[in-house]
Image (cartoon, helix red, strand yellow):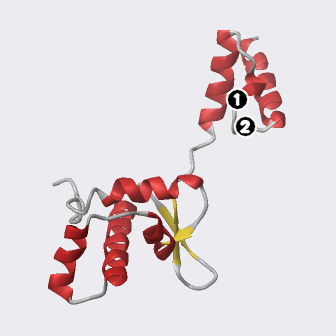
Amino acid sequence: MKKRRSPFSKAGDASKQIIGALLDSRYQTSSLISAQIILPPESICRRQLVYYRSDSTTKNNIVLRTLSNLLKQGKVCRRIGTAGLFEYILPKKKHGWMIAAVKAAIENGNDPYKIDGIPRKTIAYYKYVISKSKK
């Protein structure tokens, strides 16, 4: 099967800018995302010539289509928000990385409690599980 590629790859690589706008790990609508990115004028003009729309509508259309493509690739997740609009976020990591990070920190002699993003209770539990599995 042919690899799916965004039809707007000429739009200043909008997908990289959209993923960059979603890095703050909160759900955002497409209009919030389009307000955070900058597209080159030639991509907007190219789209306007075909559909006769305003700048903001054209930019939002490019963002929506790129978000749809990223959703099909599995690079973003979406939900229906309280206003009935789709809200997008980057997919969350699985919890398996936590125990691997704690195990690597213990093996390297580092303090596992200094690992960012893991609660202290979880680290204590993983240390207990690791110590029991070694016996």
Q: Secondary structure at mark 1?
A: loop
Q: CA distance from mark 2 to mark 1?
A: 6 Å
Seen at 78% across and 26% down, the residue is 113
Residue 111: percent from left, percent from top: 75, 18
Say the numbered circle drawn on residue 84: none
Indicate the position of residue 50 as horizontal and vertical percent values.
Answer: 15, 84
48 relative to 76 in the view: left or right: left
Q: Mark 1 highlights which residue? A: 115
Check disc 1 and give the amino acid type: Ile
Question: Which residue was labeled with disc 2?
Answer: 118
The image quarter containing residue 97 is: top right
State which quarter of the image contains the C terminus: top right
| Amino acid, disc 2 | Ile
Give the image location of residue 130, x and y in percent.
73, 20
| Residue at 74% over, 26% down | 114
Q: Residues within 10 Å of mark 1 (few under 14, many from 20)?
A: some
**Nearest to the observer: residue 133 or residue 112:** 112
Where on the picture, by quarter, is residue 126?
top right
Judged left or right of residue 5, residue 98 is: right
Vertical side of 35 occupied by 123: above or below: above
10 Å neighbourhood of mark 2: few (<14), some, or many (≥20)?
some
Q: Would you say the residues marked 2 and 1 are in contact, meaning their CB atoms lie under 8 Å apart?
A: yes
Which residue sits at x=16%, y=75%?
Answer: 46
User: Is disc 2 placed on a helix, strand or loop?
Assistant: loop
Q: In the picture shown, does residue 54 fall above or below 121?
A: below
Q: Position of residue 31 (x, y in %)?
A: 47, 76
State whether residue 109 is above or below residue 126: above
Left or right of 130: which side holds 85?
A: left
